[in-house]
Amino acid sequence: MDSIHSLIQYFTELPGVGPRQAKRFVYFLLSRNARYLDEMCRLIQDLKNTIKTCTECFRFFPNDTRDGLICNICKNINRDKASLMIVCRDVDFETIEKSHLYNGKYFILGGTVPVLEKVPEKKIRLNELLSTVERRAETEGLREIIFAMSVNPEGENTLDFLKQSLTPVTQKYSITMSALGRGLSTGTELEYSDSDTIKNALKNRVSERKSDDSIIKT
Amino acid sequence: MDSIHSLIQYFTELPGVGPRQAKRFVYFLLSRNARYLDEMCRLIQDLKNTIKTCTECFRFFPNDTRDGLICNICKNINRDKASLMIVCRDVDFETIEKSHLYNGKYFILGGTVPVLEKVPEKKIRLNELLSTVERRAETEGLREIIFAMSVNPEGENTLDFLKQSLTPVTQKYSITMSALGRGLSTGTELEYSDSDTIKNALKNRVSERKSDDSIIKT
Amino acid sequence: MDSIHSLIQYFTELPGVGPRQAKRFVYFLLSRNARYLDEMCRLIQDLKNTIKTCTECFRFFPNDTRDGLICNICKNINRDKASLMIVCRDVDFETIEKSHLYNGKYFILGGTVPVLEKVPEKKIRLNELLSTVERRAETEGLREIIFAMSVNPEGENTLDFLKQSLTPVTQKYSITMSALGRGLSTGTELEYSDSDTIKNALKNRVSERKSDDSIIKT
Amino acid sequence: MDSIHSLIQYFTELPGVGPRQAKRFVYFLLSRNARYLDEMCRLIQDLKNTIKTCTECFRFFPNDTRDGLICNICKNINRDKASLMIVCRDVDFETIEKSHLYNGKYFILGGTVPVLEKVPEKKIRLNELLSTVERRAETEGLREIIFAMSVNPEGENTLDFLKQSLTPVTQKYSITMSALGRGLSTGTELEYSDSDTIKNALKNRVSERKSDDSIIKT
């Protein structure tokens, strides 16, 4: 197979890319000059060389400071150590962090637990989470774990599995477990809402918006 | 114009129907027998003759009992009179009622207030709402008004306009004004959530689901 | 069931209409006045009373002239009797006729023959077609039958079935059977064309556009 | 900017890729091991080093034989030299070639001429085409030029521009200019066809499928 078709095949492994788009990528690259392709390779090599996994929260981060494998958020002494938000993936972490609303710490699970999964602990960093919670409770005054999962079957299943798995350690240290609140989200049309959303929207209805919650930046 | 094309034109006035679908409707009707068309007309005439607007909540309802123009929900003595939910349209009312979660009364505004609307009171039943609230406060012990609007610019604008318009009467009678709670709704992917939704999901986060709220059926 | 929900259920039988759109139709009608609904019924009754099936080509047509059950196209002496176009449905006839390109006569099959259909002659007006062809060959000098079917499995299957069924009568009277030409259609992107389309586009390639074909209006 | 965000920005330049998909690409790469990234770079470097532009037809081709810069099709003595198909891009060439229907030679324009373009000759390889046609007419017996353009405004405009530009040379050497035939393409629904497609489908209607055309493989 020539290098055009090898690269087309390679690109189809990228998420959401079919054979047609992969082919368009390759012809796009062919239409660029050699310097452009070299730059692409340099960026990919950079990714390999400069991005590390934080040993505390397990997120990918640029390790340019060369002072250990702890990311800037985990090192930041102004972030609230009493609160730990659990997210499934780095992209979820990015969305939360970009909102500039949360001032606590994070833990990236590295995956979700599919419904009916037989060996859930193989899909996510469960042991790392358990020891992180234990350590933070002992030494950093952890008081609340916030589960931030998508509201779909896989997200809900992951949430249930985590609650169950963390119950012993949270009871031992009197840590509150909470989940992101549910209700109408931006863009929700009332006419097309399901009963579950309406139920939560009714429960969480608000008469006045107050915020005396230290982990939420105002 | 012949009756095929007159009816095609007529059908294009139906919400969401373009000329192609309208034409398909007409040819569908042509392929049916005379009895089918007569039945359609009978149902439309029935609609005209048997559906009335409730004089209390202003929703359309089947007035088959011929005992006045008050709908079954407004007449139901088991519904909680202390609570009044304001919805924009009948379809919103239907969605809430079909969830079997709300046990209070309703008021249908009959529309929404578009952003920058100069004469908002022409778009919705504002006077009817004000006198309903006054009357219910005086005679039926109304204590809470729940705004149930879609989370889009028009819904939010309607909400703001209503809060402002109802402030005098709610202060006079110490009525709470609340809005459906916001947060993650069913199907929300965390990765694609906006800051506003995340903010509300953080505020409304729940550690345990309790319901000691009389208007929510359990 | 009340008349709102009866009519919702009725509307869901219209082609392409689901329960949500059906509900929107009904609430749209409710928001209109009585005269509007009466007008709708009048148009539907008109459809029933004034639209007839042409006894020659079997299309629906407005029979306002009350001079028999033959449509204006079948009666038109300026249309070329030597050519008969076979279409599956009235909407196909409408598309062809609206193009103002074809000057011959039509026959509406009233359906298509699904692939693997056991009793094809029950799906379309086969007997009527056979006797029409025989009669037109005997008395009107029919020389060409043009099959105008969509290029999808059902259309192709109908085409094959018709060719086979009409072979005896066309051989008897030396009638040519032809099918609409294939090639690139408006909007076709070459990159995404299938082999069959390319094959026909190559075969039918044109060096200069001439038209000395009497059935095509210029 | 760290290498994650540099690469995200880079990936958004790929055709059809937005910021979200670009981010997913990067996190996908992060989740793979170093060898995978090295392989990707190797394939990109291979593309740069092994794919050349054919000096005759101007298509990209794998130059692994190291015996000059002429592609396998241009070198193939079994391809019909009398016929030259003009396509806009390499992907169009690929679609035609993959159909295994065309046995002549190709010329890749390298672009299209947008409607109202002031300097059309800057968008495509016009001079190269003119000298190719001249040379092939003189030395290889070229008899037919086939324009294979998409049926959209840009494709049609390119076709018109080429016909005009090639008229002198084709007249000088008595070369036929033809364009891919038009008509119903695979998937076309008759009901939704435009007049232009119907016109061509009528013109190109076929009574029997014969193929005595040497450039079409059977």
Image: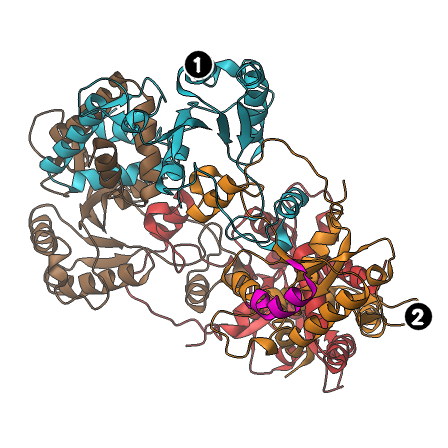
Chain colours: A cyan, B orange, C red, D brown
Q: Is residue B175 magenta?
A: yes
Identify residue for label 2. Answer: B67
* The image quarter in which residue D33 lies: top left
Q: Which residues are magenta?
A: B161-176
Q: Residue A51: x and y, percent?
A: 24, 24
* Viewer-proximal residue among A86 and D198: A86
**Left or right: where does residue D198 sit relative to residue C52?**
left
Indicate the amino acid at tag 2. Asp
Q: Position of residue D138 (x, y in %)?
A: 7, 51
The numbered disc on residue B53 is none
Give, as a three-letter code, the residue at label 1: Glu
Task: Please identify, in this view, whether the residue under mark 2 or under mark 1 is nearer the observer.
Answer: 1
- The residue under the point 72% across, 44% down is B213
Q: In terms of image quadrants, where is residue A109?
A: top left
- Classified by dominant secondary structure, the portion drawn in magenta counts as helix
Relative image position of residue B9 (x, y in whole percent): 62, 76
Q: Quadrant of the N terminus of chain D?
A: top left
Q: Is residue A30 magenta?
A: no
Residue C58 visible (yes or no) = no
The span from disc 2 to disc 1 (Cα, nearest Å) is 70 Å
Pointer 1 local density, CA inside 10 Å: few below 14, some 14–19, many at least 20? few
Note whether D55 is above or below A41 in the view shown: below
Tag 2, which chain?
Answer: B
Task: Report whether mark 2 lies on the same chain as mark 1.
Answer: no
The one of B95 and D74 positioned closer to us in this rendering: B95
Q: Where B185 sits versus B117, above or below?
A: above
Point 22% across, 17% down: residue: A68
The kind of secondary structure element at disc 2 is loop
Residue closer to the observer: B140 or D167: B140
**At 47% from the left edge and 15% from the top edge, which residue is drawn?**
A126
